[in-house]
């Protein structure tokens, strides 16, 4: 038998299969019947396109800025040679704007320092003015005090001298001798009064001594009576058991 060719074999196989088993080409659905997933993908693609457009606009704007900046030749070469020059441009812009920010901050800090120094200088000058004015006031007060003392000092000295003279006169009066009769009478009366007081003092001491002795004697008597009472109690307590034993002995006997 002759061998069949491969094409004829495949035709026979296809003719032998059912229509449902045959592979049919896929038909595309209309756009109005797209599921939500395809819509979200479309939105994402639109968003990416808009981002790319924004980046392109930014690069155009940055190119204008690069034109104003004095970039080095190395950076220009890197921008032209690299496939993605946006990264290099962004870094260059960051450095440029960062340096500008630092310069602005340094200038601001310098201005603040200058203002602080100016405030301190003004404060010091104000303090100096206050000190000078207080010194002037002190000098004026000292002058007025000295003038017042010059006016008052002679009056004070005169008053002191007058007081000293009055004291001397009083001492002299006290030192003058009195009449002999008056002096003798006064001295006698004083002596009598002193003797009376001495006698009264001796009498008082004797009376007090007698009272003390009487009190001591009474205290001694009271102590003796108490001792006797205690002895009697002891004797009575000792004799009671003997009496009781005698009574019991006589009863049982």
Image: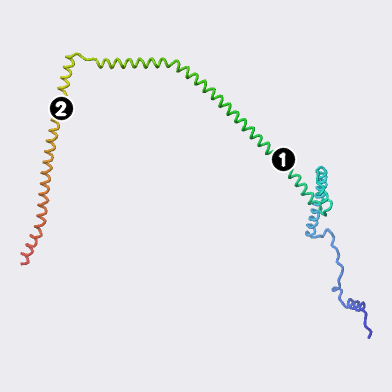
Q: Which numbered disc, 1 or 2, marks the residue closer to the eye?
A: 2
Point out residue 167 in the picture as x, y percentages from the top left corner: 31, 17
Left or right: residue 219 versus residue 83 is: left
Q: Which residue is the site of mark 1?
A: 104
Point out residue 190 in the picture as x, y percentages from the top left corner: 17, 21
Q: Residue furthest right?
A: 2
Q: Residue at x 10, y 52 (%)?
A: 231
Q: Residue at x 16, y 24 (%)?
A: 194
Residue 189, placed above or below residue 60: above
Q: Quadrant of the C terminus?
A: bottom left
Point out residue 129 in the picture as x, y percentages from the top left corner: 58, 26
Q: Which residue is the site of mark 2?
A: 198
User: In what element is the residue under mark 1?
Assistant: helix
Q: Residue at x 28, y 17 (%)?
A: 171
Label 2 neighbour load within 10 Å: few <14, some 14-19, many 20+ = few
Point out residue 180 in the picture as x, y percentages from the top left corner: 18, 14
Residue 15, quarter of picture: bottom right
Q: First in sequence, mark 1 or 2: give its number.
A: 1
């Amino acid at each position: 038998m002759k061998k069949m060719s491969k094409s004829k074999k495949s035709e026979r196989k296809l003719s032998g299969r059912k229509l449902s088993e045959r592979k049919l080409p896929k038909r595309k659905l209309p756009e109005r019947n797209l599921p939500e997933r395809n819509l979200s993908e479309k939105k994402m693609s639109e968003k990416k396109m808009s981002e790319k457009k924004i980046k392109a606009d930014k690069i155009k704007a940055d190119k204008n800025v690069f034109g104003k900046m004095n970039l080095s030749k190395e950076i220009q070469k890197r921008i032209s040679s690299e496939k993605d020059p946006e990264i290099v441009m962004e870094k260059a812009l960051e450095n440029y704007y960062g340096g500008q920010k630092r310069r602005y901050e340094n200038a601001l800090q310098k201005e603040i320092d200058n203002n602080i120094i100016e405030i301190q200088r003004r404060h010091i000058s104000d303090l100096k003015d206050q000190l000078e004015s207080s010194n002037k006031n002190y000098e004026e007060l000292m002058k007025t005090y000295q003038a017042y003392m010059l006016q008052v000092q002679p009056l004070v000295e005169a008053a002191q001298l007058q007081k000293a003279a009055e004291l001397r006169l009083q001492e002299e009066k006290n030192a003058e001798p009195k009449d002999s009769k008056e002096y003798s009478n006064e001295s006698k009366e004083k002596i009598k009064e002193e003797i009376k007081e001495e006698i009264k003092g001796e009498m008082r001491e004797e009376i007090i001594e007698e009272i003390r002795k009487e009190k001591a004697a009474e205290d001694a008597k009271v102590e003796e009576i108490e001792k006797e009472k205690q002895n009697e109690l002891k004797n009575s307590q000792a004799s009671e058991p003997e009496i009781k034993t005698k009574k019991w002995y006589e009863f049982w006997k």
